[in-house]
Image (cartoon, rainbow, N blue to C red):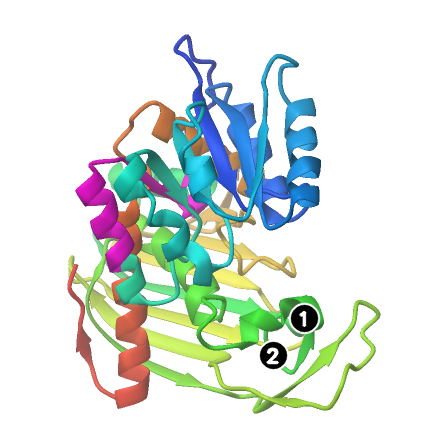
Amino acid sequence: MLVAAPCFAASMSSQSPIRVGFIGLSSTGWSATAHAPSILKTGKYQITAVSTTSSESASRSSLVQKNAQDSTVEVNAYHGDVSQIWNDSKVDLVGIAIKASGHCEALRPVLQYKKDVFVEWPVGVTLEETREMLNWAKQASVRSVVGLEGKYSPVFQKVKHLLSTNEIGRIVSTTMLHNLPLENYSRGPIVKERNERAMLLGQGSTLLDVPCGHSLSVFCDVLGYFSSLHANAAIMYPTYQLVNEDLEPVGPPKQANCYDHIAVNGTLSSGVLASLVWNAGEKNVKGRKSFEWVIEGEEGSIRMESQLAAGAFISAIDPELYLNGEKIDVEGTGGFVVNYQGLWNDFANRDGQYPTLEDAFKIKQILNAIETSARERREINVTE
């Protein structure tokens, strides 16, 4: 068995910390679980302000973040108008971690206040919104960073190293499979009430918007971008049943209007042939892998796989890694907190590898090409 050392590590900075104000950082939820712990673990940031939808939630969040830091750090609490947090003199970087439908309006003040910005994926709902936010950041001459943290998984960093050292020779093809099981209750025939947004078009949370986007960002970071693709997509479960946390039905079944199965075949700019599939809604049965990615070379093969229920979410769950059938134990893995820590470290160090609004726009172009190809049933040339 081979053991791979971690490819990055956090280090304390001798420079003044970057002061962050987070729009959408409540005392609970994704931002509190993923963003706040990872950004503070780097030792290079302070959270100095939060902005939520109510004074009560802002006060609770402020207290939580104050208790998580040095007692001398003040955390200002705002609610309502996001321009308040942009205007805070103790904020250097504004983080936007709210629903995708609110990303544009939350970022718009960058034109006036000209502060660096973090935007959670999917960076708006549509390609046009992402383009607009990118243009605003360029006009304001600020740095941007985007929540595409999957590339920082030590597993995918190790894969990039194996490819760069020619371990499997010239790459000729690749296949990537995702199975999002029924038991996630987020996409498919049974959906928990709190997850219904993932079943609604125009919210930026569908299978195509989020899981596909995150996986494609990792895929393209490792192997490069598509030059052309052809996609097929289907709604295999025409209705879905909302349930509560006890899995009891809530109301009658509803009509599904977004894809739950997507298949993409294409050619990368390097000439490599690629096939990617996303399935949602099947039962999590023994032997069914939630994720498998194979990279075939002339002289060998790399395989990554997971059988965990959430294994298809590769930005958050580290898969197992195999080189020519032999398992490689990769040190330093830790899921989304570790991955985000790598992202925040790179941004603080001004390392050019962190994902930006430019990168988000490229991924959105691919997603747009997939949607267009599936709808019009034709091959699409993808602009890098």
- Which class describes the residues within 10 Å of circle 1: few (<14), some (14-19), or many (20+)? many
Residue 1 at what x, y percent from top left? 53, 37
The residue singled out by tag 1 in the image is 185
Q: Is residue 220 above or below residue 157?
A: below
- Which class describes the residues within 10 Å of circle 2: few (<14), some (14-19), or many (20+)? many
Is 147 inside the magenta-drawn segment? Answer: yes
Determine the secondary structure under disc 2: loop
Given the image, on which type of amino acid does mark 1 rest? Tyr
**Labels 1 and 2 touching (C-beta < 8 A):** yes
**Which residue does the image show at 52% across and 61% down from the upper left?**
291
Q: Nearer the viewer, residue 175 or 234?
A: 234
Report whether 228 appears left or right of 251. Answer: left
Q: Is residue 365 above or below residue 334?
A: below
Q: Nearer the viewer, residue 235 or 198?
A: 198
Q: Which residues are magenta?
A: 131-152
Q: How far is disc 1 from disc 2 in space, using C-alphas? A: 7 Å
The residue singled out by tag 2 in the image is 188
Residue 201 at what x, y percent from top left? 46, 77
- The image quadrant of residue 268 is bottom left
Residue 41 at what x, y percent from top left? 55, 25
